[in-house]
Amino acid sequence: MTPEDLGRSLQAEPLLGALKRHGVDFVVIGGVAGLAQGSSYPTYDLDVAYSRDPANLSRLVDALAEIGVTLRGAPPDLPFQLDVQTLGNGANFTFDTEFGSFDVLSDIAGIKSYEELRGASRLKRIAGVDVRVASLDDLISMKRAANRVKDQLMVVEYVELAEELRRRQGGDADV
Amino acid sequence: MDLEPGRLLRETRLRHGLSQQRLARRAGTAQSAISRIEQERVSPTVQTLAELLHLMGEELVLEAGRRDTGVDLSLNRANLELTPEERVQKGLEFADFVRTNRGGEASLQEP
C-alpha cells in the first residue's frame, strides 16, 4: 500500500467553493461531514449529495466544469460529456480532481430523499465555506446501509457521538 | 444478544422438565413449531416467546442497557471543543499524515 493508493491530498475549499459560487443545492455527506460533526475518522475524499432539480443540474455542471473533473477509474479515452443530460441520465458520479477525489451522489442508500436529507442538515463552515452538512442521524443511516467493515466501525462511533451530543443538548434533539 | 430465543426457550423448557410435545399442547400448536424455534430455524416474535414462557410460569424480561462499544470518546470530546471548520481541517491533516506515513513500517523492515 502506497500513499498514492489513498489518492491526492484532499483540499475541500476549491471543491466546496465552486459548488457555492455556482449556487448548487447540495449537502456534504460522508467522511467530511462526519469530521464536521466531531468524528475522529480520517477521510480521503469529499462526498456531496445534490438536488436532481433540472436547474440545479445545470448549476452543478457549471461547477464541475470549473473544477475540472475527470471520471475516476475510467480509461482516459472513455468519452465523458459533462452536461445536464449526462447528469440526468446517471445518479452517482465519482470524480478525480486536482483537489482530491470528489463524489457527487443522488442515489444514496439509507436516505429516503434529498429533501429529507437537506431538511435535517445543518449549516456549518468548512474550509471557509458555509455549507449544509448531513445530520449525524442521516450519516448513521447511510453507514448502516453501506455496511462495509469500515462503515460498521464508523456507525459505532457515530452512535456514541450522537448520544454524547444528545446528552449535551438534552432530550431528543436533532444531531 | 448473547442468548438466542430458541436457546432461551429450550433451556427454560428443560428446566421445567417439559417435552416439546407438552409445551406445544399447552400452546395449542404443533411440536414441530416448538422444535423450529428451539433449533433457531425460525425467530419468534417477542409476543410469541413471552406467551410460551408464560405457559411455563415464567416471564420474559426485556431491558435495554447501555452498550460497551469500546469507543474512546475523549477524541470526539476534544473535537467537539473545536468549530466544525477546525474539525474538518484537523481530520484532513490527519488523513495526510496517514497518507504520507502509510507503508513506512514495511519500508523500515526492508534490508
Image (tube, coloured by chain):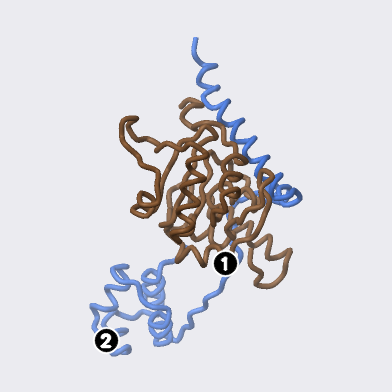
Report in which chain the residue with disc 2 lies: B
Residue type pointed to by label 1: Gly
Q: Nearer the viewer, mark 2 or mark 1?
A: 1
Task: Find the residue positioned furthest to the right.
Answer: B81
Count of numbered circles on the image: 2
Residue beneath the point at 51% across and 51% down: A48
- The residue where tag 2 is placed is B29
Contact between labelled residues 1 and 2, with CB atoms less than 8 Å apart: no
Kindly report the distance in space between the C-alpha atoms of the residues bearing marks 2 and 1: 49 Å
Residue B19: x percent and y percent? Answer: 30, 79
Q: Residue A130 location in percent, x, y?
A: 66, 52
Q: Residue at x 44, y 40 (%)?
A: A95
Categorize mark 1 by other alpha carbons within 10 Å: few (<14), some (14-19), many (20+): few
* Residue B40, disc: none
Q: In which quarter of the image is residue A159?
A: bottom right
Q: Position of residue B53 (x, y in %)?
A: 42, 82
Identify the chain of the residue marked 1, using the numbered disc in the image: A
- In the picture as drawn, the residue positioned furthest to the top comes out as B111
Residue at horizontal 66 percent and vertical 69 percent from the top: A173
Image chain in blue: B
Q: Is mark 1 on a helix, strand or loop?
A: helix
Chain A's colour is brown
Q: Amino acid type of disc 2?
A: Thr
**Image quadrant where residue A170 sits:** bottom right
Front one among B106 and B26: B106
Mark 2 lies on a secondary structure that is loop
Q: Name the residue under label 1.
A: A119
For disc 2, the neighbor class at 10 Å (few under 14, some 14 to 19, many from 20) is few
Q: Position of residue B51 (x, y in %)?
A: 40, 85
Is residue A161 shown above or below A94? below
